Amino acid sequence: MLKPRLSLWFTRGYATRIAEKPPARFPDPLLNAPNVAAKTLKDENLTFIHRPPPTVPSPHSTTLAPASPLLKSPTPSNKHAPMPPFLRPSAYNAAPLRMSDKDIEQLRKLRLSNPEKHSRAKLAKLFKCTPNFVSKIAALPRPKRKEFARKMEAEHETVRGQWGEKKATFVAIKQKRREFW
Amino acid sequence: MGHVSKRLYSSASKLAVSTSRLKQFPPKEAILVPDSGKPNFFDPELWAALQPPPTSALTAFAHRIGLANVLSSADVVRRACTHKSFLNLHAKYYPSSPTPPTNANLATLGNSLMGLFASEHLHAAYPHLPTRVLKAAVSAHVGPLTCASVAQEMGAVPLLRWHRQPTTPMSPALLHSDALASIPRAITALVYQEISLQSARKFVQSFFLSRQVDLQSMIRFRDPKRALTETVEKFGRERPKSRLLKETGRYSNSPVFVVGIFSGQDKLGEGFGSSLKMAEYRAAEDSLHRLYLTRTPDHLLQVPSSTFPFKQGNIYKTGLEVPYTPGVLGEAEILYASSGRSNIVAPKRPTLEEIEARREGLDV
């Protein structure tokens, strides 16, 4: 049995307006940034909006409120605090163990006896350290160092002479860009 | 009007030559004598350079810089504006006239005083600045170029009496800026002599130490990462490690990386760049800038020379003691790129054997 549908006369079963997506209203990007400082001058009809770049550090550092953590007490180390990832994958490797004094002596002996035969790279591979470490602990005397540098420079000069114009230009551009770091 | 007369009048108007003070204008040397066969060598610019500036200009200068009570007479100002290079020129053309007093002694004294005030002010203001940067900052505040700029701003250029000197085997060339720089130095010395050390410090503070100098752009490094590692070790903290904070467009032609350098949990500094290496370099630079450019607030800034008495007299005598709290001493600076060696290789000193051999050689 049909129920009495009073709504038949008071409602309609069709839409009088075509459904539209409401117009997208986006927040003003100038005012929506987190560190916005906006100042309005009503008389001159001007608005000054300062949006500091998100990572520019503050230039102001005073002795009462230093910007450098070196001048403040160090924060207690928390192993479980989330930290951004390291820049290089090699940083995740454990630090190598200290080289024994015996190994250091042997490294020095080898390097100073015949630096051409026992190069930094070969010694680093042999003793499981880095070439820079070899330079630091088994530094050659200054005249020997200068001689090596001169030889290297001469070799590089010949290589640079073989470059074409394009390559030389690109290298020069890279060097200039490096000056602006 | 001949061309010589025209040049004479134009030179006289460019330099501050007061023709009313002269006995005769145009001067005798300038007037051509057509009868005599002697050639007339007259240089109007040289003549104008030899004349003293007028009293009105000197008095106006003293009042303009607010030191009318210190630079009481025009002669004092004239002395302060005469460089020692002028003496030779004056003696050559006016040998019978008395030699004009120069600012040589005053300039030397004033230079030392300005160096003292600038060094103590900057050391108190930036306690963690390394030595070579402090030296550069002192030069920026009271160096020869700044002194020359200040002299120009004061309006001392037409009052300066000097003579250009080319490079000789014994001395470098004398430049206009060097001669100009002697004027504010001489004025500092005069303030010290006439009033007191405190007044001289006030003068240097208002004209030189209140100038804005962008130290951040002056501090550059050859290897900021190495300098930072050594600095952090000096402070006894954990070794600095670089971490990637943000990145965008890594494989595009315009990537942006933001790298932070951390010592344990503390972020020492951050930097951005279009490559990882560049961002890391800038982060290291930023860490060192944050340390070096830590400034003492003005209300806490006190300099040692403020303890000297205000009155003239013996500064070592006990007088009114001004309460003075010494400033913070920064951590000792690192050896790398410090001004210790300055890449200067000292000449090899002869050994004892060599000295004896030389002596024996002479005897034989």
Image (cartoon, coloured by chain):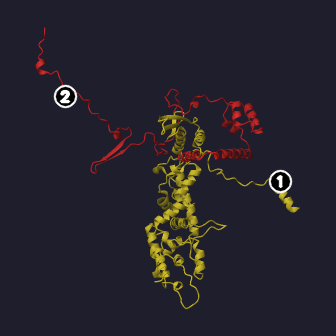
Chain colours: A red, B yellow
Q: Is residue A118 left or right of residue A71?
A: right
Residue nearer the viewer, B190 or A46: A46
Task: Name the residue that disc number 2 marks.
Answer: A17
Residue B314: in sight, yes or no? no
**CA gap, disc 2 and disc 1:** 111 Å
Residue nearer the viewer, B356 or B119: B356
Task: Name the residue that disc number 1 marks.
Answer: B353
Q: Is residue B155 left or right of residue A32?
A: right
In the rendered image, the quadrant that contains the C terminus of chain B is bottom right
Residue A101: quadrant of the picture: top right
Three-letter amino acid code of the residue under disc 1: Glu
Most distant residue in the front direction: A164
Circle 2 packing at 10 Å, graded few (<14), some (14-19), many (20+), is few
Front tag of 2 and 1 = 2
Name the chain under label 1: B
Residue A49: quadrant of the picture: top left
